[in-house]
């Protein structure tokens, strides 16, 4: 199932690739807008049947005719993998790199960082550049949505705790500050267009990512090149902190990161997960 957020807090289930059906009532209109998808994910075992029933019988709305929002507008937390592709490690410290000459370690040293949950924006959103004179980069990533509470989970059991997957942009201010500051500005975590449930993604280690800016390919890679794969990331982070339904793991970016400018049209496509499109503006 593909699960959408649309029209300021309503939930949708995809039918074919061009329609959705409003399934907000399955969770309940009384649930606060920002909490609806989290509630659906937490109660999925109990509600999946009702979602399928509504999707099959409800009124089909053309995707082109609705305004999509972030499928998970306020995750409990977003934990992100720093330097989880070797190609990105090489470009950051290498000649002409963002931190040229610096020794760049990888996830085995850095482990992880938190992005503020208020940095989420959705498909069609605008990434707002906060400072005119400072570089802000795109980072194309696979987002993992947690489905079941995970504490001290081993990698062999990890995928049973994953609800689904979503294209994610880890927008990043370059500079000396801590990652959690540089990556947490409002609008710096676009996700979408939909959360695709894990049953439709048999192997999260064989997905292809492609990011374009104004039509030109900037990043292209496969999740098979991750240093820590999805199960290992769930193990690593759940060892430190309890992962809860609706939490998101940003799995890291391959090489090809680059600066954004006002007016840019940014598209991230991941095989089987659809295309996330945002534009860039000034704050
Ligand atoms: Mn990143």
Image (spheres, rainbow, N blue to C red):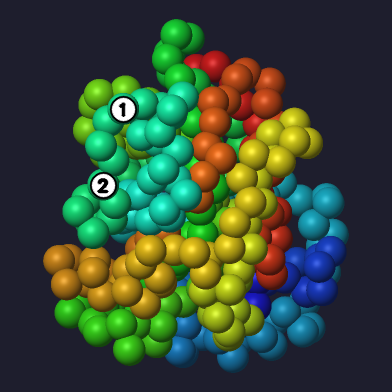
Q: Residue at x 58, y 63 (%)?
A: 222
The quarter in which the N terminus is drawn is bottom right
Q: Which mark is residue 101?
A: 1
Give the Cα distance between marks 2 and 1. Answer: 12 Å
Q: Residues within 10 Å of mark 1 (few under 14, many from 20)?
A: few
Q: How far across and how far down the image is residue 108, in percent?
A: 23, 59
Q: Quadrant of residue 249?
A: bottom left
Q: Secondary structure at mark 2?
A: loop
- Please say if 49 is above or below 151: below
Residue at position x 57%, y 25% from top?
A: 260
Q: For mark 1, give the secondary structure.
A: loop
Residue 158 is left or right of residue 145, and the answer is: left
Q: Is residue 80 visible?
A: no
What residue would you read off at disc 2?
105
Of 149 and 5, the residue lying toward us: 149
Q: Nearer the viewer, residue 144 or 175?
A: 175
**Looking at mark 1, is its residue's CB closer than 8 Å to ligand 1?**
no
Marker count (numbered):
2
Q: Nearer the viewer, residue 102 or 247?
A: 102
| Residue 28 image point, x, y percent | 51, 70
Q: Position of residue 203 (x, y in %)?
A: 55, 80
The residue depicted at 45 percent of the width and 38 percent of the height is: 91
Q: Which mark is residue 199?
A: none
């Amino acid at each position: 199932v593909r699960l959408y957020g649309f029209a300021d807090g309503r939930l949708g289930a995809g039918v074919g690739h061009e329609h959705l059906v409003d399934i907000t009532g399955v969770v309940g209109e009384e649930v606060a807008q920002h909490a609806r998808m989290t509630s659906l994910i937490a109660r999925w075992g109990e509600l999946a049947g009702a979602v399928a029933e509504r999707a099959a019988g409800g009124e089909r709305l053309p995707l082109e005719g609705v305004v999509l929002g972030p499928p998970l507008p306020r995750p409990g937390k977003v934990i992100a993998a720093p330097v989880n592709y070797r190609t990105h490690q090489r470009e950051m410290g290498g000649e002409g790199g963002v931190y040229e000459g610096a020794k760049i370690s990888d996830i085995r040293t850095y482990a992880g960082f938190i992005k503020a949950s208020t940095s989420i924006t959705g498909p069609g959103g605008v990434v707002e550049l906060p400072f005119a004179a400072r570089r802000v980069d795109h980072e194309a990533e696979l987002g993992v949505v947690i489905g079941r509470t995970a504490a001290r989970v081993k990698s062999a059991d990890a995928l049973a705790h994953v609800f689904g997957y979503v294209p994610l942009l880890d927008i990043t201010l370059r500079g000396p500050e801590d990652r959690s500051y540089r990556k947490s500005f409002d609008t710096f975590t676009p996700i979408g267009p939909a959360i695709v449930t894990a049953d439709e993604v048999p192997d999260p280690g064989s997905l292809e990512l492609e990011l374009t800016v104004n039509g030109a390919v900037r990043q292209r890679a496969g999740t098979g090149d991750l240093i820590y794969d999805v199960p290992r990331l769930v193990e690593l982070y759940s060892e430190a902190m309890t992962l809860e339904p609706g939490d998101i793991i940003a799995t890291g970016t391959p090489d090809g990161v680059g600066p954004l400018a006002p007016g840019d049209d940014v598209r991230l496509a991941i095989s089987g997960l659809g295309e996330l499109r945002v534009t860039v503006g000034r704050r």
